[in-house]
């Protein structure tokens, strides 16, 4: 049986929850996508792109692992930040294992330190994953592994590259071994618990970050408005891009509407590949000055309203 085949009825199945935590931009979403074998979480060079607790579902022989891809945990200042941190720690509760992903190059010590302090007190099995080994120098990498292992009682330490996949299979196998016996929680062909509607909004948001880089501030959202299947089997999706200020609208639209057209085309292409059907994507921009204080917007994004 290969690692992603469904178990035979005689095989004893195992199923567990793995929380993936780390400082912003440590490579959590990329690693989850590698473990699952396809894209289930958005990735971006812009920190804090993951907002909701997106689940990926990875299989290894008779073992199903529910991967909770938590938002990067950082010092929360605004309501949106607080909601994201809340979602992250909720994702770590009652997990069978916690993966701490560390970027050995940037490290982000001010954000890593509170994580280490919190992990010291947690009862779950903890695994250290040092990411980006394709770029990091060996000696400092080993020193960092030794230092962090001195702080936390990690079950195992893995050196991986979430981008290239180096070391990921060995880590996946080790994770599978510590999952408890039990029936699978999801069908074998399901890779995420995110609704297609929410995933579609996330993919559009990823394109916003990719194409606008530093021009667009972090306080933007994509609201799903309509998601329906046409008689010919294709999918029609309407989304609203929410910005906080009127001056941001022309940034998203671009000259003659070229920017929003390019964002839409890229998102539509990726969605068509992901869903396996033709997608018709319609985007429009709305200025909503205090959207980050709007309970409805939060719930549409899959986040809990935190006061």
Image: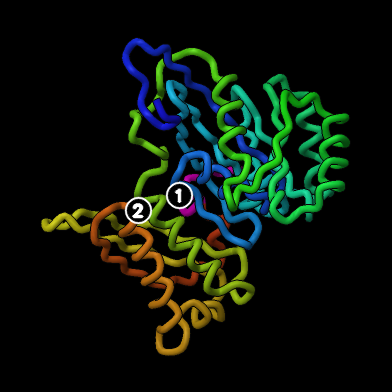
| Mark 1 touches mark 2? (CB < 8 Å) | yes
Q: Which of the numbered marks, if any, corresponds to residue 39?
A: 1
Which residue appears farthest toward the bottom when viewing the image? 256
Image coordinates for residue 264, horizontal then vertical, percent: 38, 70
Q: Which residues are magenta?
A: 295-307
Query: In this figure, which residue is indicated by the disc labeled 2?
Result: 274
Alpha carbon distance from label 1 to label 2:
8 Å
Image-quadrant location for residue 127: top right
Q: In this rendering, would 92 be left or right of 252?
A: right
Quadrant where the image shows the N terminus: top left
> Is residue 47 rendered to the left or right of residue 29?
right
Which x, y percent locates residue 63? 46, 23
Q: Nearer the viewer, residue 103 or 90?
A: 103
Residue 251: numbered disc: none
Q: Secondary structure at mark 1?
A: loop
- SS for callout 2: helix
The picture places residue 270, in percent across and down from the top left corner, at: 38, 61
Protein image colouring: rainbow
**Quick check: 81 left or right of 281?**
right
Picture layout, residue 160 above or below residue 164? above
Q: Is residue 295 above or below residue 212?
A: above
At 86% from the left edge and 48% from the top edge, which residue is drawn?
140
Q: Nearer the viewer, residue 184 or 88?
A: 184
Residue drawn at x 63%, y 40% is 167
Name the quadrant of the C terminus: top right
């Amino acid at each position: 049986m290969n690692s992603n085949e469904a178990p035979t009825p005689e095989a004893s199945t195992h199923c567990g929850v793995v929380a993936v935590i780390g400082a912003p931009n440590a490579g959590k979403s990329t690693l989850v996508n590698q473990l699952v074998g396809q894209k289930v979480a958005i990735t971006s060079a812009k920190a804090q792109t993951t907002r909701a607790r997106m689940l990926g579902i990875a299989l290894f022989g008779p073992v199903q692992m529910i991967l909770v891809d938590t938002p990067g945990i950082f010092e929360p200042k605004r309501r949106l930040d607080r909601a994201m941190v809340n979602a992250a720690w909720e994702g770590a509760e009652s997990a069978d294992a916690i993966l701490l992903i560390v970027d050995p190059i940037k490290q982000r010590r001010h954000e890593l330190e509170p994580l280490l302090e919190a992990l010291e007190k947690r009862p779950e099995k903890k695994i250290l994953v040092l990411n980006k080994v394709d770029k990091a120098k060996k000696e400092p990498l080993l020193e960092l592994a030794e230092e962090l292992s001195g702080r936390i009682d990690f079950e195992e330490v893995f050196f991986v590259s979430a981008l290239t996949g180096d070391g990921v299979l060995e880590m996946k196998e080790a994770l599978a071994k510590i999952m408890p016996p039990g029936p699978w929680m999801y069908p074998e062909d399901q890779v995420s618990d995110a609704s297609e509607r929410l995933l579609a909004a996330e993919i559009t948001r990823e394109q916003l970050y990719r194409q606008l880089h530093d021009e667009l501030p972090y306080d933007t959202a994509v609201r799903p408005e309509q998601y329906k299947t046409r008689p010919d089997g294709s999918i029609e999706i309407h989304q609203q891009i929410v910005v906080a200020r009127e001056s941001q609208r022309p940034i998203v639209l671009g000259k003659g509407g070229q920017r929003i057209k390019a964002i839409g085309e890229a998102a539509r292409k990726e969605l068509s590949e992901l869903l396996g059907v033709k997608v018709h994507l319609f985007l429009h921009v709305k200025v909503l000055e205090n959207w980050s204080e709007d309970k409805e917007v939060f719930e549409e994004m899959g986040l809990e309203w935190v006061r």
